[in-house]
Amino acid sequence: MALIGSRKDIAKNDMNFFAAFTESARKTAQILLTAILIGLIFVGAFVIWWLYWIFSNMGVKSDIKDLQEKLADPVYADLEVEAQDLQNEINERNQYYYALTEMRRVVDEKTPADTALCDLLGESIPNDSYVAQYELTGSQFTIEGFSFTYYGALNMVNILQDSDVFHTPLDAAIEKVNLDDVSAGSTEEMMTNPIDGYYTFKVIGNITSSAYISVAQYVNIDGQIISVNGIETTEYSIGSAYEYSDISSIEYNGVVYTLSSVEINGSAVDADTLNSIITTDKVTGRANADAKISFIYQVTDTEATEEGGEES
């Protein structure tokens, strides 16, 4: 009977199987070794992080302890009182600065008259007119007098209006009067003139070419209005536009205040205007005359609740 295979073939097959088994075992050992190394790396990293956290925590606790011991020193016993005293001093100096800027605003708004004003008035008086008096109050120049004709006084107004002294249209009032009603201060020549009718005139004009817009900010703290800084006064040409933006909120002593009211020359704007100012975050207008704008801020109810803690 013939054999299925020779001994040599069987031995060869056994050797191939043993080699394949050895290679598989080697790969398995490599995978296992890699997994062990990765595990050791993760464990080592965790141990290092844990030790770092422990030592860091110990350092923080040590710093806290040192700080507590330092604050317990009598030198720092009145630190809070000193801080409050410094804050009060800052507030007082701030109010003093506000007063200085307020006086500066008043000075800026006092524009001196043109030195040629009197000469101009003298050159503008017609032969049939008489100036009884003139007065300069602030930036307003007032002229009063008499004229034999209506157009004589009107001609003087036109000459003055064409000059560079007056920067707004002149306001003129011309009325006819009887001789008996003429002021006792008139000259003897006028009183003895055979004409039985005269005209009295009054001319008012603004001699300034600029307007001053002043801006101030205040905070309302428990009903007490405190100026945040000084008054900012800016000169504008008559009729030019002005704009103040980024006004919806301010920070004062670490607290954020929101705009609650706007006053122009001491009068609060209406609700619609205030809402428009808050929405656009700016105030705009034209400098037709001197004006003072006040922005008043206060802490909102939500912010006050958050600072004071939750309501019970």
Image (cartoon, rainbow, N blue to C red):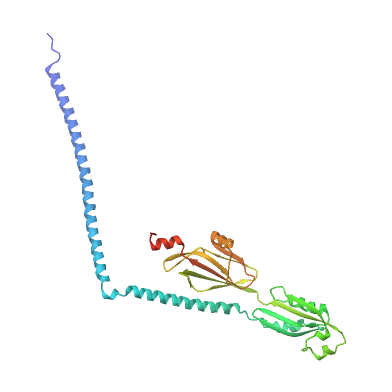
Whole-percent x, y for residue 61 in the image: 24, 62
Determine the residue located farthest toward the right in the rendered image: 194
From the viewer's perspective, tell me whether residue 109 is left or right of residue 129.
Answer: left
Determine the residue located farthest toward the top in the rendered image: 1
Q: Quadrant of the C terminus?
A: bottom left
Residue shown at 57%/60% (left/top)?
276
Instruction: Tell me if residue 78 comes above or below residue 20 in the rendering.
Output: below
Whole-percent x, y for residue 47 in the image: 21, 51
Whole-percent x, y for residue 285 in the image: 61, 66
The answer to which of 300 and 288 lies nearer the viewer is: 300
Residue shown at 48%/66% (left/top)?
298
From the viewer's perspective, tell me whether residue 229 is left or right of residue 306.
Answer: right
- Count all numbered tags in the image, as a single digit: 0
From the viewer's perspective, tell me whether residue 2 is left or right of residue 100.
Answer: left
Instruction: Tell me if residue 131 comes above or below residue 304 in the rendering.
Output: below
Determine the residue located farthest toward the bottom in the rendered image: 188
Determine the residue located farthest toward the front in the rendered image: 312
Q: Can I make out residue 165 in this image? A: no
Q: Quadrant of the N terminus?
A: top left
Residue shown at 45%/77% (left/top)?
93
Whole-percent x, y for residue 216 in the image: 53, 71
Q: Can I make out residue 117 in this image? A: yes
Instruction: Tell me if residue 178 comes above or below residue 247 in the rendering.
Output: below
